[in-house]
Image: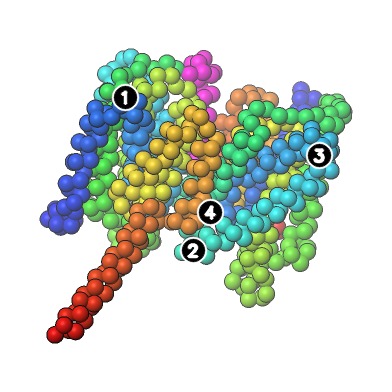
């Protein structure tokens, strides 16, 4: 799409994106320290959800491989932590996830619908159980200690990843690959017939977006400080971004962010004291939004907004008519 | 050598019987209703915990309890389909859209049922022992409960096969799976048949769960493993094929018994490996895509 059309159509977003990034960057200084630490979790899930949405949002291919790719990043970080500087680790974590995702992408070309969902779930589980087997039988360890980084460093790195995800998501929405992805989501055969190289676009978008997941994993390893396969490949990390994205709504860029923030806040309140209640609410949310609220909160808000607007116009029409009648009477 | 080979085969068959029973329920729900129910394992664990509580609290023998538990789960499944999945079917654009959405809903159900169980039964291991007198088969000893579980699983699978093949309702189910619109024209009440199928799937999970509780210790969080077993078997046997699921269950049981014999820690890796490879090479499963029992 031409830059000029983007400029004219998306003026609010062009202001909002830099403002949001700066606000996120300075947020820890504005709030008490305890909340600042929770912000790391919020940011981690926001980045994961945004990167999940890049590929799965427009195409409708629900990937459950997030935990696998996040874990690849975590383990890259755990192995290299004491040998190379942290910036390089993050980059390498991204590259490792990219390569794994590229291989998955090439393998899954033929799979659609539930087969794709199952395959991505299976591959994440296969990576996990293979790493677990390797660690216990070859490395002879259950888990690994990772030299920690300060909260400030972790937060800064996550903010940079957030900026990447947000700007990347925005550019993808307003570029020809983004349109092509949407075309694939609406009708894959038709998209192929009008000349879209669907294979290339699917594999590349999937692997590039998952590089962000790997990088997030690499950063978070230095925050976890101790990792084992059940932490690095926690299946919840595959499910949460899906639920966060559809709770918020994938039709707008801010939808997934909204969903992620709501669920992480809920998690922070409930997970330590009542983990089962949290997961119960999580399950109910998933059921309710998929069946009764498929467009997510964004669509719900839009519906309410339109309803309110209609009411407002009706009210105005009534008052003007009333005024006119009164003026007519006066005369 | 020969003795351990026999041991692998018998253990494999016992495991396989349970796997087959677990998989048939899932296969029915997917083959007819297009719901890939990943909360299937939770239904199994729910039944297992129910049998455990009935035995330890009320002293009801699991083989008696099963006549309460399986129908109860049938009703739950029936109601779930009539309410949730029916709404979902109505609002979906096409079958693929419905499959994706119903998969997500059943993931939601998984979290709901699992955490309800964790709240009510806790996270610890629970087990009881019934009928564990040893029985000798070809030189090796097995618990009577395991042998009985194999017998019940095989009988139930066969009975179910005959039901699907020869009864009026079974024929309606197969018709609804193969040509939904045509079946409806010929007077099959599709909504009712779909709900019955989902209910039957849950009921079979109930039966499998009671048998499971007689063989293994139960933990509320382990349903997902059983779901994965069921999905692997169903994918290996061909999604939607009931015969495929029965055969796939026994094949996988034998493979896992063999892997367990070589190195027990590899069994999970083997599971996922078989799963991923079958999905890649032959997504329609080894026994092809036959939606019904033929």
The residue that label 4 is drawn on is B102
Name the foreground residue: A35 vs B64.
Answer: A35
* Residue B18, horizontal then vertical, whole percent: 72, 40
The residue that label 1 is drawn on is A33
Q: The disc numbered 3 marks a residue on which chain?
A: B
Q: Secondary structure at mark 2?
A: helix
User: How would you rate the neighbour count of disc 2 (Cα within 10 Å): few for under 14, some for 14-19, many for 20 or more?
Assistant: some
Name the foreground residue: B43 vs B279.
Answer: B43
User: How would you rate the neighbour count of disc 1 (Cα within 10 Å): few for under 14, some for 14-19, many for 20 or more?
Assistant: few
- Tell me if label 1 and label 4 are in contact, CB under 8 Å: no
Name the foreground residue: A306 vs B74.
Answer: A306
Q: Is there any visible trace of residue A96 in the rendered image?
A: no
| First-in-chain label (4 vs 2) | 2
Q: The disc numbered 4 marks a residue on which chain?
A: B
User: How would you rate the neighbour count of disc 4 (Cα within 10 Å): few for under 14, some for 14-19, many for 20 or more?
Assistant: many
The part of the chain drawn in magenta is A121-143
Q: Main secondary structure of the magenta part?
A: helix
Circles 4 and 2 on the same subunit: yes
């Amino acid at each position: 799409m031409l830059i000029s059309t983007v400029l004219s159509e998306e003026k609010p977003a062009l202001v909002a994106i830099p403002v949001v990034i700066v606000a996120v960057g300075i947020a820890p200084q504005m709030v008490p320290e305890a909340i600042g630490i929770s912000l790391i979790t919020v940011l981690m899930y926001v980045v994961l959800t945004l990167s999940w949405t890049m590929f799965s949002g427009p195409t409708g291919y629900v990937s459950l491989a997030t935990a696998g790719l996040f874990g690849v990043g975590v383990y890259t970080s755990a192995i290299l932590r004491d040998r190379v500087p942290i910036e390089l680790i993050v980059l390498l974590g991204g590259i490792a996830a990219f390569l794994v995702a590229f291989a998955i992408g090439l393998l899954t070309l033929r799979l659609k619908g539930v087969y794709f969902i199952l395959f991505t779930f299976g591959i994440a589980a296969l990576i996990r159980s293979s790493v677990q087997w390797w660690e216990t039988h070859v490395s002879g360890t259950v888990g690994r200690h990772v030299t920690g980084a300060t909260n400030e460093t972790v937060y800064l790195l996550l903010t940079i990843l957030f900026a990447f995800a947000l700007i990347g998501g925005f550019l993808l929405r307003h570029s020809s690959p983004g349109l092509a992805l949407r075309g694939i989501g609406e009708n894959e055969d038709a998209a192929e017939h009008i000349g879209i190289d669907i294979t290339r676009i699917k594999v590349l978008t999937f692997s590039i977006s998952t590089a962000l997941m790997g990088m997030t994993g690499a950063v978070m390893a230095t925050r976890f400080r101790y990792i084992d396969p059940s932490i690095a490949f926690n299946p919840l990390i595959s499910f949460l971004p899906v639920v966060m994205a559809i709770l918020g709504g994938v039709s707008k860029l801010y939808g997934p962010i909204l969903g992620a923030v709501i669920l992480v806040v809920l998690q922070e309140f409930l997970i330590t004291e009542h983990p089962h209640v949290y997961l119960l609410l999580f399950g109910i949310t998933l059921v309710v939004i998929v069946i009764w609220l498929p467009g997510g909160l964004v669509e719900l808000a839009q519906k309410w907004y339109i309803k309110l607007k209609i009411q407002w116009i009706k009210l105005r029409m009534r008052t003007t008519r009333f005024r006119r009648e009164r003026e007519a009477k006066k005369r | 050598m020969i003795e351990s080979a026999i041991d692998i085969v018998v253990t494999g068959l016992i495991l396989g019987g349970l796997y087959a029973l677990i998989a048939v329920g899932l296969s029915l729900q997917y083959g007819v209703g297009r719901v890939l129910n990943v909360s299937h394992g939770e239904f199994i664990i729910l039944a297992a915990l129910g049998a455990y509580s009935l035995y330890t609290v009320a002293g009801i023998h699991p083989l008696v309890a099963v006549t309460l538990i399986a129908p109860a789960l049938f009703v739950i499944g029936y109601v779930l389909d009539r309410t949730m999945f029916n709404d979902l079917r109505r609002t979906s654009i096409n079958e693929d859209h419905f499959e994706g959405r119903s998969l997500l809903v059943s993931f939601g159900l998984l979290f709901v049922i699992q955490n309800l169980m964790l709240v009510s039964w806790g996270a610890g291991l629970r087990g009881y022992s019934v009928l564990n007198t040893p029985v000798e088969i070809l030189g090796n000893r097995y618990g009577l409960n395991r042998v009985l579980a194999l017998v019940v699983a095989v009988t139930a699978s066969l009975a179910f096969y005959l039901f699907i093949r020869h009864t009026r309702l079974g024929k309606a189910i197969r018709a609804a799976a193969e040509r939904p619109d045509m079946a409806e024209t010929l007077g099959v009440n599709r909504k009712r048949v779909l709900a019955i199928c989902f209910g039957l799937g849950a009921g079979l999970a109930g039966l499998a769960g009671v048998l499971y509780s007689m063989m293994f210790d139960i933990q509320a969080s382990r349903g997902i493993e059983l779901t994965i077993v069921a999905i692997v078997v169903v994918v290996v046997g061909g999604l939607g094929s009931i015969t495929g699921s029965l055969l796939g269950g026994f094949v996988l049981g034998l493979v896992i018994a063999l892997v367990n014999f070589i190195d027990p820690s590899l069994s999970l890796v083997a599971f996922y490996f078989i799963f991923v490879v079958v999905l890649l090479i032959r997504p329609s499963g080894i026994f092809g895509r036959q939606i019904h029992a033929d």
